[in-house]
Amino acid sequence: MPVTLVIGAQWGDEGKGRIVDYLARQAHLVARFGGGPNAGHTVRVGDKTYKLRMVPSGVVAGVEHCVIGPGTVVSPAQLVAELDMLAFNGIETSRVWLSDLAHLILPYHVELDRAAERERGKQALGTTGNGIGPAYVDRVARVGLRAGDLRDMRRTRRTLYERAQALRTQGVKVDLDVLGAELEAHAQRLAPHIRDTVVLVHEVLERGGRVVVEGAQGTLLDVGLGTYPYVTSSTTVAGGAGAGVGFGPREVDCVVGVAKAYLTRVGGGPFPTELAGPQADELRSRGAEFGVVTGRPRRCGWLDAVALRYAVRINGITHLALTKLDVLDSFYEIPICTDYAGNEHWAWPFRVECGATPVYETHPGWLRPTVGAHAWDDLPFNARQYITAIEARAGVAVSYISVGAERSALVVRPGAPLAGAATAGP
């Protein structure tokens, strides 16, 4: 069972990139299973920061193969730009593979996305406007284009013509000459990267290689299990990883859920533990809580252990990675939401939608820097107590603790997946 899944256990922005970066150093292949370029994974190495939107975070660690899986939706223009950015920074990109089954985001998807948000007015969902939702709609409606279609531009142009006729009835005009020329240019640039990634993944598995699969966004944004309708357009939970890459559940060894030591959210939707005022400002400032893709300030609040326990259950999380513990170093008291008042027999999304009132348990702060800690015993006593309380509420061990933005600022506890494993060879 050589697959390790890395799943966001909150509303996204949990710091999955740096956990994948660590795990990738002992892996042969890293794959992304869903989402589009609305997800930003950040990896910081020394004084360099890499902000990745589609390419798996393992590319920075130099993993043998990086796969953008069949479950993703991909903007050819944005992927070309990202590959160019990585190459400019000296990162090898010849090992980045785009599944020929991944669906494409085209300019008219972006137009449809932004128009829909404008029409919603005050009820806007807070999408990034990158066309992800409309691309997934086209996929389900069976009118989308896949990366593999770029191999036959004559047939692709016919498909685009038919789609343009249908879009005309919605008031969306498509300049087929411009779009066709752009796609042909992108097709030439991406051709060396497009392949059957399902076979590649299984070749690695069959030779005993280790595979890390990363999610995009977070559990609480899952289209079916999240805070609907304020969700993303794809499956973000562990159950979607196999379908999004192309393997069965028997291949999975462990599921690492990534959660911040507090909580953030971007866009609209309920947020029971959201803060306002100086405490929210301090969390946002200390945590640099601004969107990787949009630059939007994130909404900030205390850790919600009810939501975290929900994430643990529906993902089958076996280990937690707790990120940004150092952001809490300056707080005298740190509350944890341990329950909601009322509606206890409702599904979690309905409980929060209907105005869940959080019940808090307050823990003393540690008022000492955690930055520089390399082992569990290096952390202040109150910080260890805070983490222990999270473990008790979530029902699973915290195996990784990040205490700074740099990739080496990570406490790895005994029993963590791949801890101490030898770096994977070819």
Image: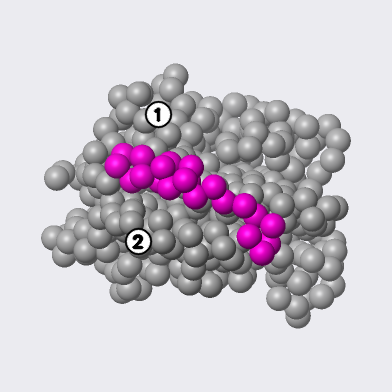
On the question of residue 83 being in view, the answer is yes
Looking at the rendering, the stretch of residues picked out in magenta corresponds to: 168-189
Q: Is residue 259 magenta?
A: no
On the question of residue 385 being in view, the answer is no
Residue name at image x 83 percent, y 53 percent: 121
Q: Which residue is mark 2?
A: 155
Where does the C terminus fall, quadrant-wise?
top left
Whether pointer 1 and pointer 2 mark residues with C-beta atoms closer than 8 Å, the reply is: no
- Three-letter amino acid code of the residue under disc 1: Met
Secondary element at tag 1: helix
Dividing the picture into quarters, in which one does residue 393 lie?
bottom right
- Three-letter amino acid code of the residue under disc 2: Arg
Residue 122, numbered circle:
none
Residue name at image x 49 percent, y 68 percent: 143
Alpha carbon distance from label 1 to label 2: 31 Å
x and y percent of residue 404 in the render?
52, 30
Where does the N terminus fall, quadrant-wise?
bottom left
Q: Is residue 169 magenta?
A: yes
Looking at marks 1 and 2 on the same chain, the residue that comes earlier in the sequence is marked by 1
x and y percent of residue 54 in the render?
44, 45
Residue 85, numbered circle:
1
243 up-or-down from 11: above or below: below
